[in-house]
Image (tube, rainbow, N blue to C red):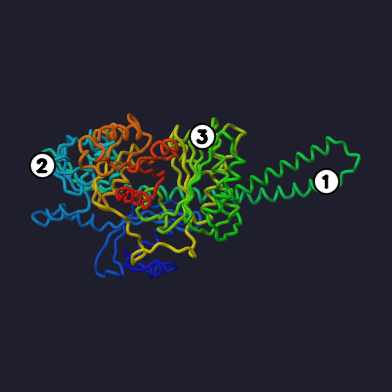
Amino acid sequence: MNGRSVAEHLGKPVREVLPAIAPTLEPLLGRILETGEPALNIEVTGETPAQPGITRYWRASYFPLASDGIGAIVVEDTPRRHAERALRRSGADYRAMVEQATYGIYRSSLEGRFLKVNPALVAMLGYDSEAEVLALELDRDVYVDAAERARNIERARTLERISGVQVQWKRRDGHHITVRLSGRVVRSEGDGAIKGFEMMAEDVTEQRTLERALQQAQKMETIGRLTSGIAHDFNNLLTVILAQSNLMGKALPDATPPQVRRDLEELTEAARRGAELVHRLLGFSRHETLDLRPLSVPEWIREELHTLRRLLPATIEIRCDAEPAAGVVEADSGALEQILLNLATNARDAMPDGGTLHVDVRRTRLAAEDRPLHAWVQPGAYVSLAVSDTGAGMDPQTQAHVFEPFFTTKPAGVGTGLGMAMVYGLVKQHHGFVHLYSEVGQGTTVKIYLRLAHEQALPATPAGGEERLPGGSDAILLVEDDPHLRAVAQRLFEKVGYRVFAAADGQEGLAAYRARKTGVDLVITDMVMPKISGMQLYETIRSAEPPDQRVKVLFTSGYPAADFRQALAGDPDVAFLTKPWTASELLGQIRSLLER
């Protein structure tokens, strides 16, 4: 947005990089540092060195960071401001601006019907034509909660203009989006009663996701600093206790009663357990001292399998699929072993009656398209270490807190709640990323992403350093019950040229396939879904199609699904992909399957 390189920004004062905006921005940043209060949805206006003489607009949210800095999310707002002007114009200029605007623009009645919409609004809601949107009822088909629209109308009775009101809408595919509305209230000339609204609608779902991710990162950073301080003080106390108990043990006379010696040994053992607790706390707060060395992950995981087999009971089957050329990372083998053992221990506890632990090592690539699922990733080549189980799984509420220290679902006295916190801290200390996917009653997958080491040969990328994501013009039927994953995947497919039909469950997917079966090249389906499972959908499709017209099927799942993989091993038109996937993994698997 500023027309300068990253290097021209780093370490420079605001007034040097943004001289036209600095007089407004510097006092605002000073207040945030002084008060610790965030500043949300701030409008910033000015010029940039790259385009002098041209006024531009931004919306920005600023957050104080625990490290005495400020995090910011800045969104270009110039097109919206230009579109607002278009609403006040008439004639051909008005129509052209409205039709070409990147923001949704509409006129609606008080009763809740669209009277006029532009193409951007049609696309935002996921429909194919203006006529389909004009047939909608806002209360029933657009608002997630009809009462929210009623409350906003009540507030608008005393207003002439509406600015920055956030509402929850739903797309045609059922995916919920956060929309910011701005515009004016249309009133009758006689009594001034509300007739309707002329509004601009901006989809801010991804911006809000980034803001929540920033707040989560800030929270974890604050907890880490607090934990580090407590751990260091606690460590000093334990050092004194251990040293004194050692001296006391040596000073005891030979005639000391055995009970006294046992008491002293119990005291020493308790102090040692406390030291182990401190060790885990330091792992979470990223103050553990790491010895980073080049490490081949496939070779390392094969050696660690012997440790896992000693750790896990015989009722748990261990399966490993390590890509031999996955690559080398800069890692501390001891810390990586702690990560693996913590994940395996949690998997064991989630499968008290036995199950399957699946360890998967792959080379992958994270791109900008992965940020809706992995918010803060740096695009590039990574080695992915995935640990999956077929245990009880976790609900969304548990997943939201799983990396926080001392959070545990185990009974009192069974766990410390530091295992996943330690995983989080050690992965961050390796400058990596961790992502968790879980389905209640089906299992959990935790994926660790570590940067590929520089000495390892990287795949060639086009000029500019960004990998071209593979695509095509094939028709894909996407069947996924998670609305967020469905929306992300659908937008990704459309971006690279595929034609996509989306369904929210197996039954809906089967109906969509029957309606378009001659025009579907690939079915992508989750394994576990309501009404009809992915396996049932596959079996129904196979039983109805001619042998020479077999559609390709790609299964996605958050757990190993080992039995299904074995049962379908003889079908060359089937492939599997483990969640959480990356854009390059998903698109690469699609091309591989379609080109067989």
In the image: residue 104, left or right of residue 361? left
The image shows residue 237, relative to residue 558, as above or below, that is below
Q: Secondary structure at mark 2?
A: loop
Report which quarter residue 166 is drawn in: top left
What residue does disc 3 label? Answer: 355
Question: For the residue labelled by badge 3, is the local secondary structure a helix, a strand or a loop?
Answer: strand
Q: In this view of the protein, can residue 258 be seen by the observer?
A: yes
Residue drawn at the location 57% of the way across and 59% of the way down: 292
* Residue 401 tag number: none
Which is in the foreground here, disc 2 or disc 3?
3
Q: Amino acid at mark 3?
A: Gly
Circle 2 residue: 189
Q: Residue furthest left?
A: 91
Q: Which of pointers 2 and 3 lies earlier in the amino acid sequence?
A: 2
The residue sitting at 51% across, 58% down in the picture is 329
Q: Which mark is residue 248?
A: 1
Marks 2/3 in contact by CB < 8 Å: the verdict is no
Question: What's the residue type where badge 1 is placed?
Answer: Met
